[in-house]
Image: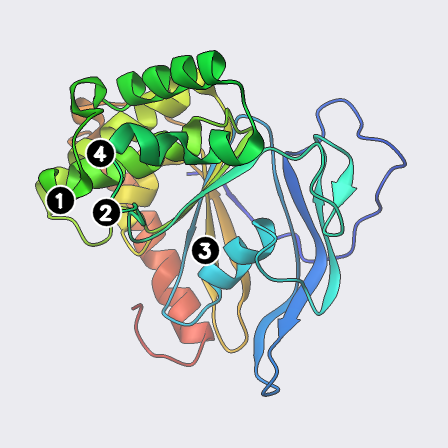
Amino acid sequence: MPVRAAHAGPADRPGDAPPGAPAVEILSADKVFANGARGLAPLSLAVGEGEFVSLIGPSGCGKSTLLSLMANLQQPTDGRVLWWRGGFDAVGREGRRLSLVFQDATLMPWARIAANVRLPLDLAGVPTPQADARVAEALALVGLADRARHYPRQLSGGMRMRASIARALVTEPNLLLMDEPFGALDEFTRNRLDADLAALWWRRRFAAVFVTHSIYEAVFLSTRIVVMAANPGRVFREIDVPEPFPRGDAFRTSAGFADQCRALSVALMEASLASGQGAAA
């Protein structure tokens, strides 16, 4: 398994986005909260176009904080976050196409599934014919074409998460950020949705950042895994997952998958020790 040391030093920003520029880039960014607690030590991390990067680490290592910086939901105390597609940093949103999927489906209970998926397009003022076509396509992508007129209460937990992913994809993002979207689901449903997400990513090839606590999920989905340590949150190690896509059930039972999971488990134990926690959480 190829393993790289984490890049933690400063980086220079060119004047314009160069060929092959990453979808999002963290440059020497840290996060200190109002109470003085340091959530993230200064770190640098780039996610390339078409990469699927998972963030994993002990509890409290700053995975969700780092994701929120990428989503512009929080600002770094120091350093910068760059979205190269539009050439804007944290001050501007124009030209930046990103979507965020939360741990909860966050659907409007009073609205049908199609209306929930359509919400970002309505807010953006997308004309009705174009919006209708994009909603239909997004629902078909996640296997919910026949559930468009259902209400969230009529769907299972897994189906609600599919609807949440459809809402994220309907804007045709170049960067998809996901914060443990399948963490509350049973193992069977989670594995099925992981497989569906991997297939979606392979077809669309958007950049993806995925927060998880699951070793198996991280290895199955990712082209690269960022292992984080805590106290303060920081990038501890980066691990490439070179197995080709598309990946299916055969990969889960392969020797290569077992080797990758074993190596990631060791990295997590070392990150936990470096965090002063004794064992990986």
Distance from disc 3 to disc 2, alpha carbons, whole Å, reads 36 Å
Distance from disc 4 to disc 3, alpha carbons, whole Å, reads 23 Å
Q: Mark 1 points at which residue?
A: 153
Q: Which mark is residue 193?
A: 4
Q: Can residue 190 be seen in this view?
A: no
Quadrant in which the C terminus appears? bottom left
Instruction: Please state which amino acid type lies under the numbered disc 2.
Output: Pro
Instruction: Identify the secondary structure beneath mark 3.
Output: strand
Question: Mark 2 or mark 1, which is nearer the start of the sequence?
Answer: 2
Seen in the picture, residue 1 relative to 69 is either above or below; the reply is: above
Image quadrant assignment for residue 73: bottom right
Q: Can residue 42 be seen in this view?
A: yes
Distance from disc 1 to disc 2, alpha carbons, whole Å, reads 7 Å
Q: Name the residue under label 2.
A: 109
Q: Name the residue under label 3.
A: 227
Q: Which of marks 3 and 1 is in front?
A: 1
Q: Which of marks 2 and 4 is in front?
A: 2
Residue 48, how many percent across, how many down?
Answer: 60, 32
Question: Mark 3 or mark 4, which is nearer the start of the sequence?
Answer: 4
Q: Which residue is drawn at 31% across and 21% down?
A: 199
Residue 112, how many percent across, how many down?
Answer: 24, 34
Image quadrant assignment for residue 30: bottom right
Residue 137, how many percent across, how many down?
Answer: 35, 15
Q: How crowded is mark 1: few (under 14 residues within 10 Å), some or many (20 or more)?
A: few
Instruction: Identify the secondary structure beneath mark 2.
Output: loop
Question: Mark 4 or mark 1, which is nearer the start of the sequence?
Answer: 1
Q: Residues within 10 Å of mark 3 (few under 14, many from 20)?
A: many
Seen in the picture, residue 222 relative to 11 is either above or below; the reply is: above
Q: How crowded is mark 2: few (under 14 residues within 10 Å), some or many (20 or more)?
A: few
Q: Are marks 1 and 2 in contact (CB under 8 Å)?
A: yes
Please tell me which residue lies in front, 261 or 121: 121
